[in-house]
Image (spheres, grey):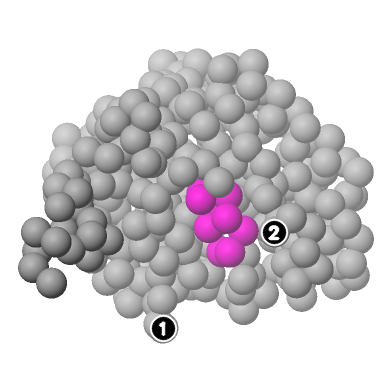
Amino acid sequence: MTRATRPAAYQGPGWRPRRVSLSDDMARERGPWSRRRVDSEYKRLEEVILHCPGDELSRVHVPNAVQHLERIDAAAIRREYAVLAAALRKLGIEAHRLPLGSGSASWPAQPNLMFARDLFFNTKEGAVVSRMGSAVRAGEEKHAALALASLAVPINRTISGTGTFEGADALWLDAHTVVCAVGGRTNPEGLRQLREALRPQGVDVLSVALPQGFQHLLGLLQIVDKRLAFLRHERAPQELSRLLLKRGFSIRPVPESEETVVRQGMNLVVVAPRTILMPHDCPSLKRYYERSGLTVAAELDIRQIRRGAGGLACAVGIVSRRT
């Protein structure tokens, strides 16, 4: 059989080789993938993933065993998530629910699944799906993979082997630079794989060591606009401050107050440049943010979310920002 007589299925006449890149595919209006991309921490937020907890919390009798601080009132936390989703919708942000494998008994929701920010890190060319650093959270990643696939977001990489990585450990400094913290949740092998995934996109991944007592980099650093950062400077490693200053960032120091440490007052959702969602019971930090030029779009009650050892930003998986 010559090429001229081969069917298209065997690369004969009629075979159409794929000549464009994944980025080109994503740019097409009706292409095979969606246009959902991220290359910053502050541009207008367009779409997110949330998981409103269900019956999984009723099975938690020893909070520390699942990395919670206190027992969570299931009804109250569902109200918190409903208010969060409504606040996002009011700002024109689409909030998608995390699918649970069509209710399959083999895919039960886990008690930390509500912290969707940790489950993936979206990029300019598809998402990096996490591999959770704690055995308690092992398997949560599959819910993120299902959600991303349902939204036609390419899965660029799933962290594998001995690597661990959680999405809240990586932050965009600019469209060509990501900073990733290595600590209890993300290990050096996870960092290596993240670098491998982002290098073809022309993105450098810088690393810093996460101080003891922090879960993720997101609890230490917030990028709220081009070259404007809020930083818990008393706890931040000097290498992180130097890194930011070298790249022209203006740093606003955030004090180690009760509002910061206990009430998660720096765990912010940046919905647009210099525009944030924050907890409702941090008046001193609110005044500080507003004096620093930020707009507080909404203040939300997160008392139950905090019992799970998280904050507002932990609850919001970032799917798409304006690029």
Q: Who comes first in sequence, dot 2 or dot 1?
A: 2
Which circle marks residue 98 in the picture?
none
Looking at the figure, which quarter contains the C terminus? top left
Q: Amino acid at mark 1?
A: Thr
* x and y percentages locating residue 182 in the rendered image: 37, 68
Q: Main secondary structure of the magenta part?
A: helix
State left or right for residue 160 relative to residue 86.
left
When asked about the image quadrant of residue 70, the answer is bottom right
Report which residue position mark 2 lands on. 101
Report which residue position mark 1 lands on. 162
**Crowd class of label 2 (few under 14; some 14 to 19; many from 20; radius 10 Å):** some
Residue 146 lies in magenta, yes or no?
A: yes
Q: Which residue shows up at 8% across the image and 68% down it?
A: 2
Q: Nearer the viewer, residue 125 or 305?
A: 125
Q: Which residues are magenta?
A: 141-149
Q: Which residue shows up at 81% across the image and 68% down it?
A: 105
Determine whether 6 is above or below 77 in the image.
Answer: below
Q: Is residue 30 visible?
A: yes
Q: Which residue shows up at 9% across the image and 64% down it?
A: 3
